[in-house]
Amino acid sequence: MKNIQLEILFKLRLCVARFGEMDGARWWNTQAVLGRYGTLALSRGLPKTHYFAQARIAFTVAAQRCKEIYPRPSVYTLWDLPPEIEDRFNQKWHDWINEADLWGPVFKTIEDLSGLELPDLILKLDLAGLVQSGGRSGRGLFCGYLFSYPEKPGNSRKPDFR
């Protein structure tokens, strides 16, 4: 897997995690952890790595919420991808922390939702064309073509990414 795909995955997770917070779509119970309040709360104690601490918090809460909503073991979500992808993502995480200055503008871009919908946020991070809107409610995202992925055990069809 190319690093650019991992960076796209990271940006996509940031967008969805930020949008899903209580000051956005209210999908999970975090209040602007990836917003200005999260930055203010964590930047004093973690001046160089606060953005990544914010992201880790938001990703963990989002993953838990998705497990509650989509408990089927045969479904991939943005927060529960094949182990090979998750392992590479976690390995790359350390490199991103070392390049924290380069990621500052990305985090700043997603801080303020100001009435944005998820597609707008995705456009702000130049991810348009890499994901498709969809799902039963029209608020899901399909990003399966970003990655080659194996069948999830117990699933006779290609997994869906939500």
Image (tube, rainbow, N blue to C red):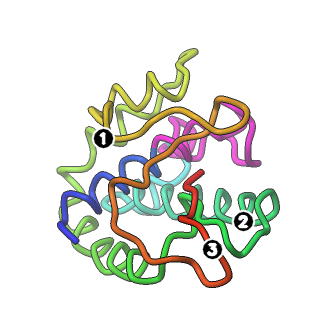
In percent of the image, x 22 and y 72: which residue is there? 1
Q: Which sits earlier in the primary sequence, circle 1 or circle 3? A: 1
Q: Which residue lies furthest to the front in this view?
A: 156
**Marks 2 and 3, how far apart in space?**
25 Å
Span colored in magenta: 15-39
Q: Do the residues labelled 2 and 3 touch (CB within 8 Å)?
A: no
Q: Which of 33 and 4 is in front in this view?
A: 4
Q: Which of 145 and 58 is in front in this view?
A: 145
Q: Residue furthest top?
A: 115
**Marks 1 and 3, how far apart in space?**
38 Å
Please state which amino acid type lies under the numbered disc 2: Gln
Q: Mark 2 points at which residue?
A: 64
In percent of the image, x 32 and y 31: which residue is there? 128
Q: Which sits earlier in the primary sequence, circle 2 or circle 1? A: 2
Q: Which sits earlier in the primary sequence, circle 2 or circle 3? A: 2
Please state which amino acid type lies under the numbered disc 3: Ser
Expressed as whole percent of the image width and height from the top left, the position of residue 51 reads 40, 54
In this view, the mark in front (2 or 3): 3
**Marks 2 and 1, how far apart in space?**
24 Å
Q: Residues within 10 Å of mark 1 (few under 14, many from 20)?
A: some
Please state which amino acid type lies under the numbered disc 1: Val
| Numbered badge on residue 156 | 3
Give SS at disc 1: helix
Expressed as whole percent of the image width and height from the top left, the position of residue 37 reads 57, 39
